[in-house]
Amino acid sequence: MSETDPIAVVDDEPAAREMIGDYLKLHGFPVALCEDGRALRRLLGETRPRLVILDLNMPEEDGLSLIRHIRASGDLPVIMLTATASPIDRVVGLELGADDYLAKPCEMRELLARVRSVLRRSASRTAMPSPEPRSEIKVGTKWLDLEQRILREEDGTEHPLTTSEFSLLKAFAENPRRVLSRERLLDLAQARDAEAFDRAIDVRITRIRRKIEPDPAHPTVIRTVRGAGYVFSPEPK
């Protein structure tokens, strides 16, 4: 991925699509405009954008379906735009792997700031790996591979992680046995997103527990501390 790769703007409303595209071009970003999911799929077949700005509410194929398609083919950053979607839709989008979201109509300066923030995080994730030997950390019933960003069973079976899952697990692994508030987790995971992201953190931790806890219904690896946040114990109790 390079600075010459375009940012894909996917919106079925021509005025909104063109306004976002023109603003990003004004600030030096190459842009590819897509009127619907089919246009985005064609673009993805031809090139790899740096980032996708995706309207959730579109006819024929909605944004959630497109996020699933994007995540199935790689770790391409996604910012969701939503005008009428319910909070559950936004949480589902984040759970599927979107990096951020904004309500429509969005303020262009805020969108630009979010674009730059997501691109910075993406660049740090794809930077050249350290020559250090592979580092793994015990997390409940599995091992977290910090280089390959996956969970691994004792027998070598691998389980992929979304970007948000890996960021949260890494934050926990680097701060064992310390109570971490949602605010602190957002800072440590470098994942400060829009309002309601606190709720998205709870959803993501529930999903992580299903992967690492011996008994997800009674978590002992990532425990909730009422009124304070969460605490991580590398080995299940």
Image (cartoon, rainbow, N blue to C red):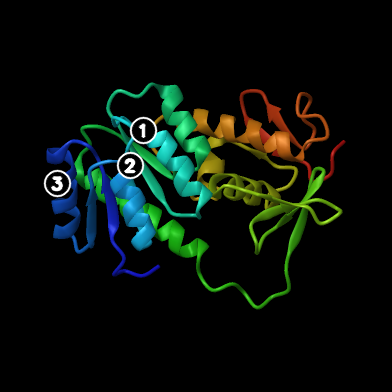
**Which x, y percent locates residue 132?**
69, 75
* Three-letter code for the amino acid on which mark 2 is drawn: Gly
**Which x, y percent locates residue 27?**
18, 60
**Which x, y percent locates residue 204?**
59, 35
Q: Earlier in the sequence, mark 1 or mark 3?
A: 3
C-alpha distance separating marks 2 and 1: 7 Å
Quarter occupied by residue 4: bottom left
For residue 37, which numbered disc appears in the image? Answer: 2
Q: Residue furthest bottom?
A: 131
C-alpha distance separating marks 2 and 3: 16 Å
* Three-letter code for the amino acid on which mark 3 is drawn: Glu
Q: Is residue 237 above or below residue 146?
A: above
Quarter occupied by residue 99: top left
Q: Nearer the viewer, residue 1 or 172?
A: 1
Q: Is residue 135 above or below residue 19?
A: below
Residue at which label 1 appears: 62
Q: Which residue is depicted at the point 69% across and 28% down?
A: 224
Q: Which residue is depicted at the point 71% across and 34% down?
A: 210
